[in-house]
Image (spheres, rainbow, N blue to C red):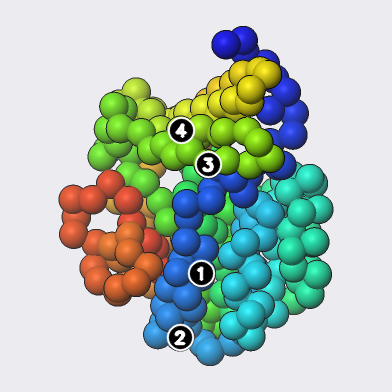
């Protein structure tokens, strides 16, 4: 098997395959319930790092007026095709501004870590606060750097256009500093050839204690178990959690 950058150059075309085992409907419905419980009942929604827009599709179907923001133009092109009713913005979650505030801001799939550094994470949180209406809610999931197991990985396989795709992802943290990595591997196997791609995405490493301290000046915070079907408190032991942050006036 020979390494190639061919898959990397058009990763947007494989994004939905890479995430095909994710229950976007369940995740979206879970956040809608949290917004109904903790939020201001508004229906204006922004999804940060929206990718190809699978979550946005479900929010629109539930009656929300949704926008999506992402740094990747090919991803946004696919998102517009999936959700022509939505507005999409090409931009950085650490520097964005909205013309009008929204009632709910989401950031799924641990994408909050793409801010890269603690300073930029703080900038993102401040931007989110400014973009929310009074009583608005910011929902995202995160991983605690102190609980990362470098030996754990998640993988799955699927078939598409006469090819088998294998996907694997894993967190890695050295044990110190504010950088962790998301390691990704993709292989594409057909009868005629085999290709594979791998990369490490630099991500911000943060403990839940540090994250709560960054959020506290702006929000009342609920840290919940990473379960989109049930609402229950984080057990202090799991390495991932849902953060529900209610804008403080």
* 55 to the left or right of 4: left
Measured along the vertical axis of the image, is residue 186 above or below residue 20? above
Decide which of tag 4 and tag 1 comes sooner along the chain: 1
Looking at this view, is 159 or 199 the one in front?
Answer: 159
x and y percentages locating residue 175 in the rendered image: 30, 26
Q: Residue at x 53, y 78 (%)?
A: 136
Gap in angstroms between the C-alphas marked 4 and 1: 22 Å
Gap in angstroms between the C-alphas marked 2 and 3: 35 Å
Gap in angstroms between the C-alphas marked 3 and 1: 20 Å
Measured along the vertical axis of the image, is residue 111 above or below residue 168? below
Q: Mark 3 or mark 4, which is nearer to you?
A: 3
Note whether residue 86 is visible. yes
Going by the picture, which residue comes out furthest to the bottom? 41
* Crowd class of label 2 (few under 14; some 14 to 19; many from 20; radius 10 Å): few
Measured along the vertical axis of the image, is residue 102 above or below residue 8? below
Label 1: element kind: helix
Gap in angstroms between the C-alphas marked 3 and 4: 12 Å
Gap in angstroms between the C-alphas marked 2 and 4: 35 Å
* 33 to the left or right of 61: left
Q: Where does label 1 land, which residue? A: 25
Q: Where does label 2 land, which residue? A: 36
Q: Residue at x 43, y 81 (%)?
A: 33
Kindly identify which numbered label has been placed on residue 168: 4
Kindly identify which numbered label has been placed on residue 178: none
Decide which of tag 2 and tag 4 comes sooner along the chain: 2
Looking at this view, is 88 or 177 the one in front?
Answer: 88
Q: Mark 1 or mark 2, which is nearer to you?
A: 1
* 151 to the left or right of 74: left
Q: Residue at x 80, y 61 (%)?
A: 81
């Amino acid at each position: 098997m020979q390494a190639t950058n061919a898959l990397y150059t058009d990763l947007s075309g494989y994004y939905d395959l890479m995430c095909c085992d994710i229950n976007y409907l369940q995740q979206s419905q879970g956040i809608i319930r949290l917004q109904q419980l903790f939020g201001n009942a508004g229906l204006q929604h922004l999804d940060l790092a929206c990718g190809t827009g699978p979550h946005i599709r479900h929010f629109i179907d539930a009656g929300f007026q949704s926008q999506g923001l992402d740094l990747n133009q090919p991803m946004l092109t696919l998102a517009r095709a999936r959700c022509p009713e939505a507005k999409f913005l090409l931009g950085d979650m650490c520097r964005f501004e909205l013309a009008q505030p929204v009632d709910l801001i989401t950031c799924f799939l641990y994408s909050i870590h793409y801010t890269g550094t603690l300073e930029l994470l703080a900038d993102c949180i401040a931007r989110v606060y400014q973009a929310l209406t009074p009583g608005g809610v910011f929902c995202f999931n995160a991983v605690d750097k102190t609980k990362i197991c470098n030996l754990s990985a998640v993988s799955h396989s699927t078939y598409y256009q006469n090819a088998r795709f294998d996907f694997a992802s894993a967190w890695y943290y050295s044990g110190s500093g504010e950088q962790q990595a998301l390691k990704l591997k993709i292989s594409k196997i057909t009868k005629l050839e085999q290709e594979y791609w791998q990369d490490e995405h630099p991500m911000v490493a943060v403990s839940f204690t540090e994250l709560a301290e960054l959020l506290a000046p702006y929000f009342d915070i609920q840290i919940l178990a990473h379960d989109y079907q049930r609402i229950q408190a984080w057990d202090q032991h799991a390495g991932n959690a849902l953060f529900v942050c209610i804008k403080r006036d």
